[in-house]
Image: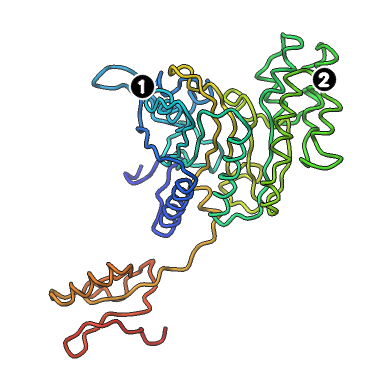
Amino acid sequence: MPRWLLPENIADALPSEARRIEQLRRNLLDLYRSYGYELVMPPLVEYLDSLLTGAGSELLLRTFKLVDQLSGRTLGVRADMTPQVARIDAHLLNRSGVARLCYGGSVLHARPAGHFASREPLQVGAEIYGHAGHEADLEVLELMIRSLASAGLKQVRVDLSHAAIVPALLAIESGLNEEELYTLLLRKDLPDLACLLGASAPLQRDALLALPGLYGPALGEQSVLTRARAVLPPLPLVTAALDDLERICVSSLWRELPEVTLSIDLADLRGYRYHNGISFAAYADAVPNSIAASTSVARGGRYDGVGAEFGRDRPATGFSLELRALAELTTASERTRAIRAPWLDDTDLRSALARLRASGEVVVQVMPGQEHEQQEFAFDRELVQTDGEWAVRPISGI
């Protein structure tokens, strides 16, 4: 096996891709700061029990484990940064009011999320801690949409769901295989779902069988909410969940974002082990081969109480996206305009180079004999010496 061969689903980012990724990362973090979000940088590895606190078994399967040679304890390489940020809010910041935190960095997956997915995603996200009202949900939804717009994605669909509905229906009668139930709901597999629910109480069976069909427009006479209120039992938790969704759907935010299609899918229960309130996902039409058409480009939701095991039970909501995948959806930008300069051991030349670079110009000194080297820059000007002075002039023919 060649020494340079990388593990499966691990790849280098070459210059043009790396530039798009880094520019997008900077743009997103600057966007979050403009909303008042503070940047945090959790460590790449933590003790495994801390890293997985409140995260569930799914994250455990995705986490690389190793033994710390100093302490002998098991370490984990983070597979998701959200639990780390929750730990920072609950255990380190210890603020009494609202905390807005954002982050960006590499995570590592023991198994890829899909056939073409990277096992080293670059995760960027934003979280709000300390506010249980729908105002926080609307803020992170707006920020998620603005994030996609900054990457050039204008036409997106946002699907809303609520993690409290299925647990409320399961409470009618116990005994169902919950893992299998959630899998069938996600697949909208009605025949197998009907078999699984065959011996259930009629009220529970009919409501759970209705969930896969409760997707579509968020507003209007035929909205999902209208149909859901008609077919789901008026249990207090179910009614409260539908009310939560309605508060989001009637917000004036959507009138400001006419390019966004808002819909509801009550069977979209990804992250059900983690979320406990409103959840949401964003989809784009044009996706590359590395992203399935049915895969969201951003996802988030409410996960109240995630900090309880760290000593503080705080309301929380947020979203995250995968930077590499999002960068693939962006239009490749033109090559950066640059100035070509000779390589000379000359004090005046170095002074001229410093002035140009300080003014924001990209200036590349071409090594002797390398005048035709390949660059990701487009040389449209050159630095030449005329009458003892160094000056920039256009390159002829460009």
Q: Nearer the viewer, mark 2 or mark 1?
A: 2
Q: Which mark is residue 47?
A: 1
Q: Nearer the viewer, residue 67 or 228?
A: 228
Relative to 149, say whether 365 is above or below.
below
> In the depicted view, which residue is nearer to us: 287 or 230?
230
Looking at the picture, how far across and down is residue 272, in whole percent? 62, 25
Classify mark 2: residues with Cα within 10 Å, few (<14), some (14-19) or many (20+): some
Residue occupied by mark 2: 233
Secondary-structure class at tag 2: loop
Q: Is 27 on the left-hand or right-hand side of 143?
A: left
Say left or right for 336 vs 313: left
> How many residues crowd mark 1 within 10 Å: few (<14), some (14–19), many (20+)?
some
Marks 2 and 1, how far apart at CA: 44 Å
Q: Position of residue 321 (x, y in %)?
A: 53, 42
- The amino acid beneath tag 2 is Pro
Q: What residue is shown at x 50% (from left), y 39% (from top)?
A: 126
Q: Residue 262: horizontal and vertical position, in percent?
A: 71, 44
Residue 266 vs residue 316: left or right? right
Q: Quadrant of residue 304?
A: top right
